[in-house]
Amino acid sequence: MTEWGGERVLVTGGASFIGSHLVEDLVSAGARVRVADDLSSGERENLATVEDDIELRVGNLKRMGFAEDATAGVDTVFHLAADHGGRGYIANYPANCATNMALDNVVYEAAVANDVDRICFASSACTYPTDIQQERQRLREEMVSFDERGGAYADEVYGWAKLMGERSLQAYEEQYDIDASIVRIFTAYGPRENETHAIIALIAKAYAGQDPYRVWGDGEQTRNFTYVEDITRALRLAAENVTDATPVNAGISDYISINQVAGAVFDRLGWEPDEVEYLTDKPVGVRHRAADTTRAEELLGWEPRHTLQDGIDRTVDWYLEHRDEDHVRDNLETLLHER
């Protein structure tokens, strides 16, 4: 069990959506936090509340020299840095997502060279086989296997890269006996997320008064939308309790449709479109996705605390406070498609 007071911690991608929330959590727990980020999608503003309490290093973690500098003198690495985005991004930029395989191994190699005690890797539900997500069955960690022929069938290049990140970390744990943990993140959302992701995209369209309101797919595809504070708590608990690189799900077990989320957003904003247009030619990914959280409960003592409506209310409130309505309306299409 790790006590974070005085712990020297590196958060890669720490200026990002999830990363910045994790940094705040660690600072509150008394950790000495360093952030390494190239600011390609992360923003300095995300760290505004803790900027005087952390060290921020800006650079490319695919470069060994920068990775070695970033991991020097560190006890724990939370590795969140990745080239990623929402469904549209990972479908349209597979080569960008493929670079995550190089990024992960550079970070791991640098961490081992600097005698880091432990690494916690932020993986993804996109590691799960896509063919088993057309019907409703909750995803269990053992549904991904490196020991059986056909045991892996990840979701797009992004999912394969995350899966290789897991396998690489397991190899480093086996060879160097470094403590390692893996958290498979399921559809995180919350303040500071950008408009390429589903819930923020749905909020942005409603805020801009888009009418007809455009929904990708038929709106009945489901995800287990998990509030960011539940995700960061899972990451901390995994680093504290798992040492052998056993993957653990961080997600809710509910199947929530895009139409349900849109309805919750309309309710919060007190606005509703005259017409909803369903764009069935857009990439939507797998049909249904929800997590089996049994392993997280057993190994981490973790279960999500935030309901969907609670999380959406918090996220809408943040969005209204931090986004200008005219800017969102004038730049909506760009916001929805660029990382």
Image (cartoon, rainbow, N blue to C red):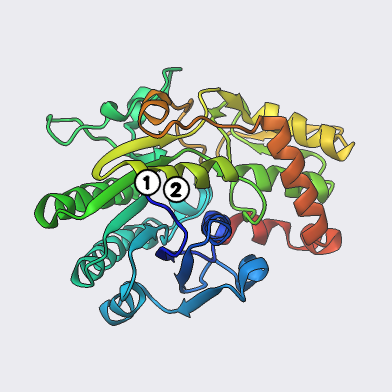
> Which residue is pictured at 83% across the width and 32% down the height?
267
Residue 48 placement: quadrant: bottom right
Q: Is residue 17 above or below residue 268?
A: below
Secondary structure under the numbered disc 2 in the rendered image? helix
> Which residue is pictured at 31% across the width and 30% down the height?
141
Which residue bears the numbered disc 1?
240
> Which residue is pictured at 24% across the width and 51% down the height?
179
Give the image location of residue 259, x and y in percent.
68, 28
Q: Quadrant of the C terminus?
A: bottom right
Please state which amino acid type lies under the numbered disc 2.
Arg
Please state which amino acid type lies under the numbered disc 1.
Glu
Secondary structure under the numbered disc 1 in the rendered image? helix
Work out whether residue 272 or residue 320 is closer to the camera in this orientation and state it.
Answer: 320
Report whether 155 appears left or right of 86: left
Work out whether residue 35 or residue 309 is closer to the camera in this orientation and state it.
Answer: 35
Marks 1/2: CA distance?
Answer: 6 Å
Q: In this view, does 33 lie above or below 310?
A: below
Give the image location of residue 168, x and y in percent.
20, 53
> Which residue is pictured at 52% across the width and 40% down the height?
187
**Mark 1–mark 2 contact, CB under 8 Å?**
yes
Residue 8 placement: quadrant: bottom left
Give the image location of residue 83, x and y in percent.
42, 61
- Identity of the residue furthest to the left in this view: 175
Q: Is residue 18 above or below residue 116?
A: above
| Label at residue 236 | 2
